[in-house]
């Protein structure tokens, strides 16, 4: 499959990264966060990024999401060369194509669940309704609750609903279960899995929990700013079967 | 030497550096309050001490009286009035001056000096030259200000028309007098050193010139400690009545002293009213900023406590922050206050002619300023400091729960409309922190109000000028006579060059009495169909002088507790001194020089005289003005010429010099407050919501959309504060207006639309400016780190 052929059909590339390097220079200190990463992600697949802290996975995720630009290398989202985009182009790219889910949910405390999702649907081209998105994550009964009235798992599901409501091409999740207990984490992963299956969204998921890798199609391991291995997972498990 | 700063203090300094913009705004607002307090009270102290020192040194009299002519022998009777310490008789005469550099005539007030020695009372301080010699009738000493205004010095000469004769007078000395610290000429509204000068001459020479040998027409006296001023004045009036006394008066009614004391009182009022407001605004800002710092540093606070620092030590860190801001504000305020006070004193020396002491560091004022600013700092900062001290370490180190929001009534109301989520965020945030939002609104509103209140003075003065100079007093000049003249003098004036129109006037000195209340005023006689000097009602419509009664200024009516239809006792203080009960048939609104008015024929009937005038209002063709002035200068019997244009010019000049400076200052302060409040509000909002805003950027919102959410709140608060500020400014001006009124002028309550407009514009510009600065920070938001950190 690394050559992009699955079941004899050629897969469509979502991302193609070539020689991505990211160097941070802070206070005279030079940190190479990514050192010449080559990677291709395909439409509709779910990949898990594993690796110790500082191995470069978050940096890559941020670059894929258009939050940051690499120091060197080329990155394509379909035919769009992200590495040639201006800050404004990147904003438009995020708005139209990317959904984000974070460890700390990043909900707007002054807006209800429905309104947090509406925040995105209002500026998206072809969104589902906020209620629909919340229903997909099983929160149809919590529409008008404010973040302060929701549990951590519920807040994260609102964040997922917010990310998928615009029917994004890619869903980028940085430790979405990091702040949750395992039981709640499973519910959150189910929501992500469902979005991936039903919407065909290319999903990249960073985690420290090696157990989660079993729900992915491919596992990409990072160390010292480089990809050290890409493994296919022949038997994809459902989230409720996972343990960690 | 290496200065060792421990870690906590280093943290304090870095925190301070991080919030330097906000810290500076707070300290500056505080500094403004302190500066106003120090400059006002410091100047009050200087004025008061200088005045008292000058009065003591020159032996300024306690009681003053003017009369027509009394024999010198009467002085002994005056001295025998119980309680009189020293009495001194003088001759005082107004003369016209012919000055080389002026076409129009000027007025001189000639005051006699005793034959031997210096005056016992109201001494002249000779600054250069000497006292005039008694034997030389052409020697005079003049006020320093008058000589300076004309570029004259000791040894120079000028012409004066003394009792009909033109004489050359030589200046032998320049001096200052306590009687004319504020040197108002007859009929003037403002001191004008070019058109009015005080001069001293030997008694004999002056007596000879005015046929007053062995006689006097003015007496002043000092009183013994504890003597009853009122009783002495009453007895003096009885003594002087047969000699044409026009009523004696105490020092507090002496014109120059009246103005000086009044100025000091006003200064003290403004020094007490404004600073507290600035300090309250500063306290509010301090509270918001320190609370925010404590909120963002709760984890650090928890950590410190976990390490074993006690509540007191932790509280002390934040208290030090408050203290530094207060001390910086105090220091800047003190320096600024001394500088401003110096400027104010320089300004006073232009209008008040007496030696002013230097503005020193008044320990009393400085101590109160320090105490008051510390109190403001404590009021503002202590709540937040206590929060820090009380925070339990376990709670502090756990992440705070998200700020809880509820859909309030307002929110439900808005949900009926389709509004975008960003707009909803703005409204929710405003309504979630109502106290803070209200305080921000009040802060900005106050700066609008401060602007309105300052500009209101200009509107008011413009209205006074419009009504007084262009509607009520439309003559070019007024010729007044030494003695009342037959009305036929009007025809003589009409034949002078350049005279277009004339109008006679008759003015009589009276005491108006209602029970125990009384006031020395003039009754002005006005002709029917007057076109130059007109009587106006409250709507500035011309009204005819009432034939059978008195038209009284509302101001006087209020002082004497009189209303329309009441009878007032009129005691004439001249000639036959009739006393009559006259009904008040009209009340008139006046802004300058409050008087009582009657038809001129009624005044003459009151005086039991035929058609008589004391002055003629004249409208002059400006092309012939110089010829007319030349003729009038040489006309005997002309006591003075009051020119409206010159009065208006000096009025405007004074306004430009004093008011505009003060107003400029207030506008700067108002902008500073608006900026300080708005900037702090924006920065706090940014600090609280940086993460939410960064999240929105990640979700695909543009910088502009995110800026809208942040600044939209500031915009709404500013918009709400504008009408609130206008209303507040309106109320404050309304309250100020009567407080500023004196016995000589009124500040009518007028606020032009342009005043509201400018106030709103200046405050909006401040808010927009601070929006721009904050926008820059929104643009610089680091998306990646904002997402990684938890709230």
Image (cartoon, grey):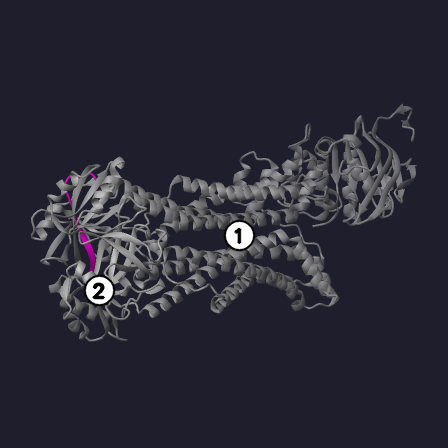
**Is B519 part of what is drawn in magenta?**
yes
The secondary structure type at the circle numbered 1 is helix
Q: Where the N terminus of chain B falls, by quadrant?
A: bottom right
Considering every residue shown, the one lying at the far top of the view is A9
Residue B525 x/y as whole percent: 15, 47
Report the span colored magenta.
B518-535
Q: Which of marks 2 and 1 is in front?
A: 2
Q: Which of B252 and A66 is in front in this view?
A: B252
Residue A150 x/y as whole percent: 67, 47
The chain holding disc 2 is B
Instruction: Tell me: residue A19, above or below residue B650.
Output: above
The secondary structure type at the circle numbered 2 is helix
Q: Can residue B750 be seen in this view?
A: no
Q: Quarter of the image holding residue B384?
A: bottom right
| Number of numbered discs | 2
Q: Which of B529 and A243 is in front in this view?
A: B529
At a point 69% along the width and 68% down the height, the residue shown is B310
Q: Nearer the viewer, residue B36 or A162?
A: B36
Find disc 1 in the rendering and name its residue.
Answer: B435
Left-right relation of A198 to B194 = right
Whichever of callouts 2 and 1 sits on the residue coming sooner in the sequence is 2
The local crowd at label 2, few if under 14, some if 14 to 19, many if 20 or more residues have their Cα within 10 Å, is many
The local crowd at label 1, few if under 14, some if 14 to 19, many if 20 or more residues have their Cα within 10 Å, is few
The chain holding disc 1 is B
Marks 2/1: CA–CA distance: 73 Å
Circles 2 and 1 on the same subunit: yes
Q: Which of B415 and B539 is in front in this view?
A: B539
Left-right relation of B780 to B640 = right
Residue B554 x/y as whole percent: 24, 51
Residue A132 x/y as whole percent: 68, 33
**Is B623 part of what is drawn in magenta?**
no
Find disc 2 in the rendering and name its residue.
Answer: B203
């Amino acid at each position: 499959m690394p050559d992009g052929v699955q079941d004899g059909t050629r897969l469509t590339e979502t991302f193609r990264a070539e020689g991505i390097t990211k160097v941070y220079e802070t206070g005279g200190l030079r940190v190479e966060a990514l050192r010449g990463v080559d990677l291709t992600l395909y439409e509709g697949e779910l990949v898990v990024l594993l690796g110790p802290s500082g191995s470069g996975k978050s940096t890559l995720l941020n670059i894929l999401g258009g939050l940051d630009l690499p120091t060197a290398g080329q990155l394509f989202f379909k035919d769009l060369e992200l590495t040639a985009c201006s800050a404004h182009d990147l904003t438009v790219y995020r708005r139209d194509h990317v959904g984000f889910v974070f460890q700390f949910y990043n909900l707007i405390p002054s807006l209800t669940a429905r309104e947090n999702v509406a925040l995105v649907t209002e500026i998206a081209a072809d969104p589902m309704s906020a209620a629909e998105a919340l229903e997909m994550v099983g929160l149809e009964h919590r529409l008008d609750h404010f973040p302060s009235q929701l549990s951590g798992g519920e807040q994260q599901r609102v964040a997922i609903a917010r990310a998928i409501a615009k029917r994004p091409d890619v869903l980028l999740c940085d430790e979405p279960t990091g702040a949750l207990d395992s039981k709640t984490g499973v519910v959150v992963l189910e929501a992500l899995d469902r979005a991936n299956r039903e919407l065909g969204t290319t999903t990249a998921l960073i985690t420290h929990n090696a157990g989660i890798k079993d729900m992915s199609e491919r596992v990409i391991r990072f160390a010292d700013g480089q990809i050290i291995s890409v493994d296919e997972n022949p038997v994809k498990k459902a989230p409720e079967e996972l343990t960690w | 030497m290496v200065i060792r700063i421990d870690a906590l203090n280093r943290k304090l300094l870095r925190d301070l550096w991080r919030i330097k913009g906000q810290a500076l705004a707070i300290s500056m607002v505080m500094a403004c309050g302190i500066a106003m307090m120090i400059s006002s009270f410091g100047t009050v102290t200087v004025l008061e001490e200088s005045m008292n020192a000058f009065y003591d040194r020159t032996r300024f009299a306690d009681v003053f009286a003017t009369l027509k002519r009394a024999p010198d022998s009467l002085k002994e009777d005056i001295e025998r009035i119980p309680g009189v310490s020293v009495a001194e008789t003088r001759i005082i005469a107004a003369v016209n001056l012919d000055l080389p550099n002026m076409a129009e005539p000027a007025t001189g007030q000639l005051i006699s000096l005793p034959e031997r020695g210096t005056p016992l009372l109201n001494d002249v301080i000779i600054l250069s030259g000497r006292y005039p010699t008694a034997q030389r009738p052409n020697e005079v000493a003049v006020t320093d200000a008058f000589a300076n205004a004309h570029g004259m010095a000791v040894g120079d000469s000028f012409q004066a028309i003394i009792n009909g004769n033109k004489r050359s007078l030589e200046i032998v000395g320049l001096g200052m007098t306590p009687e004319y610290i504020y040197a108002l000429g007859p009929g003037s509204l403002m001191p004008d050193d070019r058109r009015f000068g005080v001069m001293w001459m030997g008694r004999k020479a002056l007596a000879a010139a005015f046929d007053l040998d062995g006689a006097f027409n003015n007496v002043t006296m000092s009183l013994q400690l504890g003597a009853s001023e009122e009783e002495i004045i009453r007895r003096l009036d009885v003594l002087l009545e047969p000699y044409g006394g026009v009523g004696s008066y105490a020092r507090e009614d002496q014109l120059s002293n009246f103005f000086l004391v009044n100025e000091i009182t006003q200064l003290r009022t403004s020094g007490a009213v404004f600073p507290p407001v600035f300090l309250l605004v500063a306290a509010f800002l301090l509270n918001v900023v320190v609370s925010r710092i404590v909120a963002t540093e709760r984890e650090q606070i928890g950590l410190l406590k976990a390490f074993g620092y006690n509540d007191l030590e932790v509280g002390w860190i934040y208290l030090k922050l408050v203290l530094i801001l207060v001390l910086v504000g105090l220091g800047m305020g003190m320096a600024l206050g001394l500088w401003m006070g110096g400027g104010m004193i320089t300004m006073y020396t232009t209008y008040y002619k007496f030696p002013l002491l230097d503005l020193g560091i008044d320990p009393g004022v400085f101590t109160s300023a320090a105490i008051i600013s510390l109190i403001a700092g404590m009021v503002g900062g202590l709540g937040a400091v206590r929060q820090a001290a009380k925070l339990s370490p376990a709670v502090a180190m756990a992440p705070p729960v998200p700020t809880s929001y509820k859909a309030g009534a307002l929110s439900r109301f808005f949900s009926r409309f389709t509004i975008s989520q960003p707009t909803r965020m703005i409204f929710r945030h405003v309504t979630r922190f109502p106290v803070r939002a209200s305080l921000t609104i009040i802060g900005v509103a106050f700066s609008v109000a401060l602007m309105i209140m300052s500009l209101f003075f200009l509107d008011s003065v413009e209205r006074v000028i419009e009504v007084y100079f262009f509607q009520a007093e439309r003559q070019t000049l007024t010729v007044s006579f030494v003695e009342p003249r037959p009305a036929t003098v009007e025809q003589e004036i009409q034949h002078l060059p350049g005279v277009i129109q004339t109008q006679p006037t008759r003015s009589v000195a009276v005491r108006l009495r209602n029970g125990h209340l009384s006031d020395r005023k003039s009754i002005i006689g006005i002709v029917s169909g007057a076109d130059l000097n007109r009587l106006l009602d409250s709507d500035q419509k011309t009204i005819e002088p009432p034939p059978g009664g008195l038209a009284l200024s509302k101001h006087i009516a209020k002082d004497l507790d009189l209303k329309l239809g009441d009878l007032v006792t009129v005691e004439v203080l001249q000639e036959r001194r009739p006393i009559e009960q006259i009904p008040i048939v009209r009340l008139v609104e006046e802004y300058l020089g409050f008087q009582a008015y009657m038809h001129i024929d009624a005044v003459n009937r009151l005086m039991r005289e035929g058609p008589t005038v004391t002055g003629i209002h004249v409208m002059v063709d400006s092309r012939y003005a110089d010829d007319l002035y030349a003729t009038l200068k040489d006309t005997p019997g002309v006591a003075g010429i009051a020119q409206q244009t010159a009065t208006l010019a000096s009025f405007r000049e004074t306004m430009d010099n004093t008011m505009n400076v003060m107003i400029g200052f207030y506008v700067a302060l108002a902008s500073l407050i608006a900026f300080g409040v708005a900037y702090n509000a924006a920065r706090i909002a940014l600090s609280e919501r940086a993460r939410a805003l960064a999240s929105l950027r990640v979700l695909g919102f543009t910088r502009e959309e995110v800026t809208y959410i942040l600044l939209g709140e500031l915009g709404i608060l500013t918009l709400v504060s504008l009408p609130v500020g206008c209303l507040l400014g309106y109320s404050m001006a309304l309250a100020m207006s009567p407080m500023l009124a004196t016995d000589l002028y009124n500040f009518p309550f007028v606020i032009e639309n342009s005043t509201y407009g400018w106030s709103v514009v200046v405050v909006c510009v401040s808010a927009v400016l601070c929006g721009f600065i904050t926008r820059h920070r929104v643009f610089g938001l680091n998306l990646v780190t904002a997402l990684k950190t938890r709230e």
